[in-house]
Each structure stands twice: as structure tokens, then as C-alpha cells.
Image: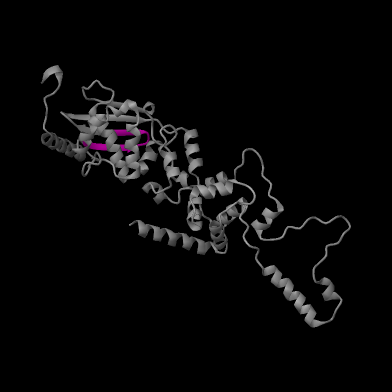
């Protein structure tokens, strides 16, 4: 025993060998062992892992205490780390093997609801979500220090059975960094830790509700908007006592000329088949996207704009003031069938993926 009751220094190699023996015993007893293994100097390399570490380092409560755990995390001292709903359990190798328990407060219902509303329709798929492939706007939402997905110091309860009196010892610091390394490979564990369902972030139903929701007022569409939405002419109601006039009826009923009759019929049929050009209104964009069964991110890819731009279009009213290039793109998209639109989105994303590689 050394001064002040501390155990004598034990070399890293000796600690590892002893930890390996103890972990093997636990494994033989049926316990699932999940060590943290870090290659190189960088602890986290993906969006979720880096975001977790950056978030913790922003708080003054932790910024002076976390660095002492980096070395422990890098040299393989975190022998076991498991993440369950609202809880982190770990074993860290020091002078002895120490047990760490960390409790995380679940994300509040109101905060989760706001995150979902802000992200609605802007995350294309579960793959995009878990790989962190989304816009800067969504990144700011989920990583916001006060309103995002990551816990604040007041929502984290720490416990370690080592003799260090500090609230955060180097063993706990190593575990917190170990969580960042684990999220590199299993980002879905963050949602489990905060007790929320990640699938709700890509819910199409929430997307449409958010896009069409008003601020307590019901919006009425003008006749021009209805015409553009449904592709038909909206007629004004007739005054009482007046009969509806049918185009071409007079020529057909008052002449027996077969050629005139045929011309009138052909003109009527061709008039029905003539499709009205796409009118760029908020309602028309929302209807077109719904017709394609796409979320905001997919539709934005199809048109060649950002997801927030599409959301702003749909949350507006009346005719949209667009640049000629964007207007031409929308008109072209409106001529596609849903199947063609889906294929076009896949093609565009494949090309972008190939360019990024």
C-alpha cells in the first residue's frame, strides 16, 4: 500500500492480463462481455459517436474531468460496457477491477415531440438516420445542447466503487468515452438509452400532419388552387331558374350534318384529355408529394432542392414565388407517375453516392 491509502501503480500490461482472466471467469458464468476496443488515437469516428463526445465536453461540469479517462478508454481498460434502457453498466480495469453504474433520465415526452416535429419529413430512411446522413438543419436539432437527444449533466447519475472521492473519476470518464465508441457501431443504442423510438423520426404520418397543420385556423383554398390540385375547372353555382348550357348541344341537335356532329364530339373529347399545366401552389406541392408517397427528403431530392425548402413550400399558402429553374423542375416532376418518380429518386441518390465515394 502506498501513501494516502492508494494502491501501488500497476503496469498496463499486467492490468490487462488480470482483467482478461476475470472477464473469462464472468464469461464462463454466463455473463455477456462487451469490451470497448479502440483502434488508433481517435475514440469516435462517426456522426453519433463524435456528437456524444462533443456534447459531454461542452459542459463545464465535465470538461476538466473527462480528459483523464481518454487514456483509459484508448488502452482497452473498459473491459465491459452494456447499454440498456436508461442505464449504462461497465467494468473498468485500474489498480483493481471497478464496477461503474450510470443512470440516464429518459427524454421527456414534450422534448421528444418537439424533436420529432422539427425533423418530420427530413430524414429519408432508417439507414440515413443511423448513419447520420442528413441536413445541417437536422444535425443542429438532434445535437442541440439543451433541446436535443443527448442528456445534460443533471440527467446523468454516476457511481463507481473505486476509492476516488471525485464525482467523476477516471474510470467513469473512460466509460463515457466508451459510450461514444459504442455508438460508432450501434447508434440505435442512444435512442434505447433515452427511452424513445427512433422510427418515429421518419414517420410519414407525422410528416404530413406537420406539413398541413395550421396555427388554430382552418385555411380555405381558392378556386384557382382547387383547380390546380384536382386538374379540373371549378364552376360557379348557377342562379335559381337557369339551366346549365352544354357546349356543342345546339350544333348537334339542330343539324343532321354528320361531319359537324363528329367534329363537335371530337372537340369535346380532346378537351377532356387536355391536361392543365402544373400550377406551383403550396397545396399542389403537398398533394403531388402525397401522390408519390414520398417524405420531404425524397421529394426534395427529386426536385433538386433542400428538405427545408419543400417544408416551407407546403407550410405556405397560395401561389409560390419560384425561380425559373425550380419551376421547370416541378413542372417536369408533375408529369411523372409515382413509379417513375421513385425510380428517379433512387437514380439520383445512387449517382450522388458514387460521386461521394
Q: In the image, what residue occupies the spot 33% across and 26% down?
A: 60
Residue 95: name its quadrant. top left
**Residue farthest to the top, as pictured:** 4
Q: In the image, what residue occupies the spot 53% across and 61% down?
A: 338
Would you place residue 141 above or below residue 314 in this image? above
Q: Is residue 259 magenta?
A: no
The tally of labels here is 0
Q: Nearer the viewer, residue 64 or 163?
A: 64
Q: Nearer the viewer, residue 312 or 167?
A: 312
Residue 328: give x, y in percent of width and height: 56, 60
The majority secondary structure of the magenta stretch comes to strand
Residue 249: name its quadrant. bottom right
Would you place residue 247 above or below residue 255 in this image? above
Image quarter in which the C terminus is found: bottom left
Q: Is residue 80 magenta?
A: yes
In this rendering, position of residue 227 left or right of residue 77? right
Residue 223: give x, y in percent of width and height: 71, 53
Residue 57: give x, y in percent of width and height: 32, 32
Residue bounds of the magenta highlight: 78-89
Q: In the image, what residue occupies the spot 83% across and 65% down?
A: 245
Amino acid at each position: 500500500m502506498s501513501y494516502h491509502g492508494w494502491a501501488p501503480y500497476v503496469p498496463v500490461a499486467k492490468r490487462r492480463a488480470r482483467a482478461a482472466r476475470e472477464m473469462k471467469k464472468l464469461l464462463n458464468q454466463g455473463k455477456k462481455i462487451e469490451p470497448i476496443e479502440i483502434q488508433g488515437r481517435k475514440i469516435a469516428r462517426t456522426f453519433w459517436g463524435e456528437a456524444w463526445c462533443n456534447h459531454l465536453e461542452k459542459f463545464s461540469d465535465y470538461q476538466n474531468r473527462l480528459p483523464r479517462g481518454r487514456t483509459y478508454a484508448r488502452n482497452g481498460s473498459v473491459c465491459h460496457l452494456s447499454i440498456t434502457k436508461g442505464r449504462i453498466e461497465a467494468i473498468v480495469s485500474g489498480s483493481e477491477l471497478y464496477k461503474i453504474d450510470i443512470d440516464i433520465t429518459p427524454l421527456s415526452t414534450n422534448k421528444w415531440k418537439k424533436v420529432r416535429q422539427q425533423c418530420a419529413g427530413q430524414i429519408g430512411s432508417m439507414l440515413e438516420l443511423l448513419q447520420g446522413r442528413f441536413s445541417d438543419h437536422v444535425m443542429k436539432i438532434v445535437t442541440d445542447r439543451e433541446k436535443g437527444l443527448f442528456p445534460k449533466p443533471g440527467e446523468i447519475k454516476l457511481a463507481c466503487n473505486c476509492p476516488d472521492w471525485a464525482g467523476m473519476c477516471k474510470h467513469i470518464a473512460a466509460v463515457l468515452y466508451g459510450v461514444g465508441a459504442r455508438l460508432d457501431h450501434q447508434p440505435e443504442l442512444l435512442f434505447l438509452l433515452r427511452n424513445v423510438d427512433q422510427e418515429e423520426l421518419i414517420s410519414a404520418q407525422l410528416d404530413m400532419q406537420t406539413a398541413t397543420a395550421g396555427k388554430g385556423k382552418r385555411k380555405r383554398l381558392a378556386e384557382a388552387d382547387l383547380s390546380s390540385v384536382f386538374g379540373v375547372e371549378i364552376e360557379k353555382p348557377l342562379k335559381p331558374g337557369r339551366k346549365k348550357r352544354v357546349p356543342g348541344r345546339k350544333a348537334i341537335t339542330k343539324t343532321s350534318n354528320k361531319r359537324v356532329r363528329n367534329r363537335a364530339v371530337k372537340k369535346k373529347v380532346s378537351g377532356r384529355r387536355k391536361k392543365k399545366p402544373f400550377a406551383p401552389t403550396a397545396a399542389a406541392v403537398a398533394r403531388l408529394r402525397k401522390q408519390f408517397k414520398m417524405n420531404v427528403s425524397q421529394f426534395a431530392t427529386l426536385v433538386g432542392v433542400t428538405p427545408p425548402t419543400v417544408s416551407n413550400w407546403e407550410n405556405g399558402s397560395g401561389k409560390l414565388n419560384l425561380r425559373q429553374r425550380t419551376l421547370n423542375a416541378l413542372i417536369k416532376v408533375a408529369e411523372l407517375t409515382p413509379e417513375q418518380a421513385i425510380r428517379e429518386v433512387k437514380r439520383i441518390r445512387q449517382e450522388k453516392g458514387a460521386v461521394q465515394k
